[in-house]
Image: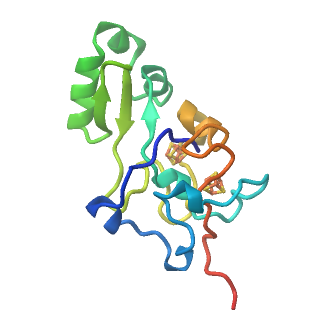
Amino acid sequence: MTKTKAPASRGPYLESARFPSWSRTVDIDRPSTWPKYKAGMCQGCWGGCCTLPVEVSAFDLIRLELITEDEAAISLKKVAKRLIKEGVVRSFHPQVQLFILQQRAGRDCLYLDEKTRLCTVYEKRPTVCRSFPKIGPKPGFCPSVPAQPPKS
Ligand code: SF4
Ligand code: SF4
């Protein structure tokens, strides 16, 4: 997946994150701790990338079938108001016309399956998710953690 910017510091929000206990060497908010991405790495990954904030455009929201093209053309502020009320969007930044998707209490993306750790809207996923980790807080690196604890 792709997200543009990780939160600057560890805060109360992260304290509730369900980052696996065996992942202590990888800190989701410290890209300097992220391993280099390699092809096939997503297989069996816990999906740390899907716990980062996701920036989406109106086009992404249309593709996700959350809004119509007409709604987007009329007023993105109105769109934001509705989606924030519905708990899908956390915030809207009119200067750049971008929305931040809401996250669950444990910080997962709303579209991440809690058990399989797979995206439930893969075909319709936002553009940032398609370009991660090529584009992201540390291009070419990602907060990859195995979904299962390492065998000792
Ligand atoms: S954190 Fe990296 S390896 Fe894991 S699912 Fe995301 S892109 Fe793939
Ligand atoms: S939309 Fe899918 S790929 Fe993107 S962050 Fe959410 S679960 Fe991950």
Identity of the residue furthest to the front in this view:
32
Return the x and y of residue 59 as percentages of the image width and height. 48, 20
Identity of the residue furthest to the bottom in this view:
152
Q: How is the image coloured?
A: rainbow
Residue 47 visible in the current orientation? no
How many labels sit on residues?
Answer: 0
Identity of the residue furthest to the right in this view:
39
Q: Is residue 66 left or right of residue 46?
A: left
Image quadrant where residue 69 sits: top left
Return the x and y of residue 121 as percentages of the image width and height. 54, 42
Of 88 and 1, which appears nearest the observer? 1
Q: Residue at x 48, y 26 (%)?
A: 60
Return the x and y of residue 140 as percentages of the image width and height. 69, 46
Q: Is residue 145 left or right of residue 36?
A: left
Q: Is residue 77 left or right of residue 133?
A: left
Quadrant including the C terminus? bottom right
Q: Residue at x 42, y 56 (%)?
A: 108
* Up/down of 95 relative to 50, above or below: above
Q: Is residue 14 left or right of residue 118?
A: left
* Up/down of 46 relative to 127, above or below: below
* Up/down of 68 relative to 2, above or below: above
Residue 28 visible in the current orientation? yes
Return the x and y of residue 41 as percentages of the image width and height. 73, 58
Quadrant including the N terminus? top right
